[in-house]
Image: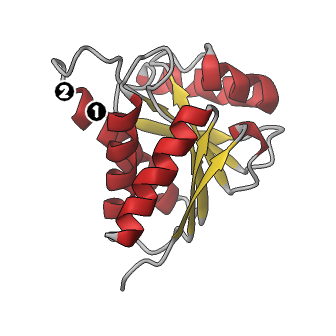
Amino acid sequence: MKNTAEIQVIQGDITQCETDCIVNAANTSLLGGGGVDGAIHRAGGPEILEECIKIRERQGGCAVGEAVITTAGRLRAKYVIHTVGPVWNNGRNQEEEKLRNCYIHSLELAQKHGITSIAFPNISTGIYRFPKEQAARIAIDAVTNELRNQETITQVQFVCYDEENYKLYKEILGDQENG
């Protein structure tokens, strides 16, 4: 069966999304940090950190490209999937594959938990310096391909905090629809 999930591009604050799940661009420690990671932990409250600490105790954090799931605490979403994007090293450390895995593993985890709507930030494009256009193409390609393999997700949002990412995602998705 072909998945007919709706893909949207939104400019705004991912902590305000009303999807079943939001994705956090976490670090390997899962203890919060800067950027979207810090914003999600602040907005969601201590329950998210408490579950992240339990995951750390169980498995020692989260590897780059992998994903784990917690409650969303005080957020509108029900869940937060934490995935660790790669730090850009000029493509010398399999960054593209690791970034692709962030999206794939997040969607697999979402399906496993019966999630129907999910919102992604622009993983690794902030302090991890992944080139934004390259990251957007990887994200869109990974998500559209993975959606073909599952049936639970009906809505995917790419939530862009900055104007540059928003324009890139709109342009790339527009090219796909017209191509």
Q: Are marks 1 and 2 in contact (CB under 8 Å)?
A: yes
Q: How has the structure been colored for display?
A: secondary structure
Judging by the rendered image, the residue that carries numbered circle 1 is 98
Cα gap from disc 1 to disc 2, whole angstroms: 6 Å
* Residue 174 placement: quadrant: bottom left
Where is 144 relative to 133, above or below? below
Estimate how packed mark 2 is, as few (under 14), some (14 to 19) or many (20 or more) residues with alpha carbons within 10 Å: few
Percent from the top left, x then y, of residue 86? 35, 23
- Identity, as a three-letter code, of the amino acid under mark 1: Lys
Which quadrant of the rendered structure holds the C terminus?
bottom left
Q: Quadrant of residue 93?
A: top left
Q: Residues within 10 Å of mark 1 (few under 14, many from 20)?
A: some
Q: Residue at left 31%, top 42%?
A: 100
Residue located farthest toward the bottom when viewing the structure as drawn: 1
Helix, strand or loop under label 1: helix
Residue nearer the viewer, 150 or 8 = 8
Above or below for 177 versus 104: below
User: In this rendering, would 153 be left or right of 47?
Assistant: left
- Residue reaching furthest right? 74
Report x, y in % for residue 39. Answer: 72, 24
Q: Which residue is mark 2?
A: 94
State the residue at coordinates (69%, 40%).
14
